[in-house]
Image (cartoon, helix red, strand yellow):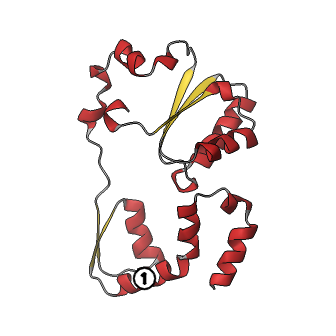
Amino acid sequence: IQGQVLGFLRSNKNVLRMATSEKFSLLFYPLIRFLEHYYLNNTKNIIAASHKLKNLLQVDYGFNGMVKAIPNSIDTTHYNFDKISKEACLEKFPFLKNVNKTIILFVGRIITQKGIDDFIKAASILQKRGHDFFCVIAGKGSDKRLYQLIREYGINKANIQYLGYVENPNL
């Protein structure tokens, strides 16, 4: 099986764009799948991060134990936009001073699993349809890979600002 996975990794265009950690996840997928199956057969209770995952465990995986869905939460006190003035924001991110377009924010690691490929593809579609926008991208990862995606999808680099990692209070 690992030989098949290695062949898939080498031949699939989307896999070639993946970060190394993502490729390792695919390489070890048979082991991960075995461990998931073992765990599901040897536990009685699971906490799922969403109702969709709960249904997936019960319907697709046939898990008969108790599943409780407890969605991830966000501490809204950290993101209270009423407490943030435009001036304070521009002080932290001065490049926004001259932006008079719709701003689209992406926050996440610059890897396929977090949706950066989909985000750039969506931006490309918006650009082709004539929408005027500015993308701000924040997150750890390979800027080389990000700029490769931007080139591949033909996005105007003047419409994108990559910040790298940004501390949560500044988001």
Residue type marked 1: Leu
**Can you say which quadrant of the picture contains the N terminus?**
bottom right
**Can you say which quadrant of the picture contains the C terminus?**
top left
Percent x, y for residue 101?
58, 18
Percent x, y for residue 129?
73, 29
Percent x, y for residue 13?
74, 60
Choose top left, top right, bottom left or bottom right for residue 99: top right
* Left or right, residue 23 beside residue 73: right
Percent x, y for residue 100?
56, 14
Residue at position x 39%, y 21% from top? Answer: 92
Q: Is residue 147 above or below residue 103?
A: below
Provide the secondary structure element on which disc 1 rests: helix
Q: Is residue 41 above or below residue 56?
A: below
* Left or right, residue 63 beside residue 98: left
According to the picture, the residue beneath numbered tag 1 turns out to be 35
Q: Residue furthest left?
A: 77
Choose top left, top right, bottom left or bottom right for residue 47: bottom left
Q: Is residue 34 above or below residue 58?
A: below
Residue at position x 37%, y 60% from top? Answer: 51
- The residue closer to the viewer here, 14 or 21, is 21
* Left or right, residue 10 beside residue 68: right
Residue at position x 54%, y 76% from top? Answer: 29
- The residue closer to the viewer here, 11 or 132, is 11
